[in-house]
Amino acid sequence: MPLALEPQEVLVTYEHAATRTRWFGGRGRHSCGRERRRVSRFAGDKIAEVWLWDDGYQAAHELVFSFDQRSSE
């Protein structure tokens, strides 16, 4: 299953952007999906800082997104 992102809410000001996004992904027989919140702070035309909050199960996330190919078996 390829990675899929579904934006749910977006709030933008001159200095910040906040998003709530649902994401889904899979590798082999493992899959997971959760919500992520992200706040970015801009400095000029660049992203200066990013904060992430993920309502997820860390072990499932690591099975899907790990670079260790053995986890996909």
Image: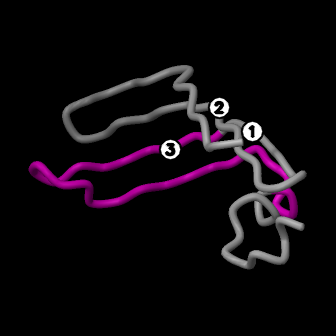
Determine whether the residue tagged by mark 1 lies in a helix, strand or loop. strand
Of helix, strand and loop, which mostly describes the magenta segment? Answer: strand
Determine whether the residue tagged by mark 3 lies in a helix, strand or loop. strand
Q: Is residue 53 left or right of residue 38?
A: right
In the rendered image, residue 64, in percent from the top left (x then y), is placed at: 76, 58
Amino acid on which the number 3 mark rests in the picture: Arg
Residue at 81% over, 44% down = 32
Q: Crowding near pointer 3: few (<14 within 10 Å), some, many (20+)? A: some
Q: CA distance from mark 1 to mark 2?
A: 6 Å
Q: Is residue 8 left or right of residue 70?
A: left
Residue at 43% over, 24% down = 10
73 is higher (above) or lower (below) than 2: below
Q: Which mark is residue 38?
A: 3
Mark 1 and mark 2 in contact? Answer it, CB < 8 Å: yes
Amino acid on which the number 1 mark rests in the picture: Arg
* Residue 46 sits in quarter: bottom left
Mark 1 or mark 2: which comes first in sequence?
A: 2
Comparing marks 3 and 2, which lies closer to the viewer? 2
Q: Is residue 65 left or right of residue 63?
A: left
The residue carrying mark 2 is 22
8 is higher (above) or lower (below) than 53: above
The stretch of residues the image draws in magenta is 36-60
Residue at 35% over, 59% down = 49
The residue carrying mark 1 is 34
In the rendered image, residue 34, in percent from the top left (x then y), is placed at: 75, 39
Comparing marks 3 and 1, which lies closer to the viewer? 1
Mark 3 and mark 2 in contact? Answer it, CB < 8 Å: no
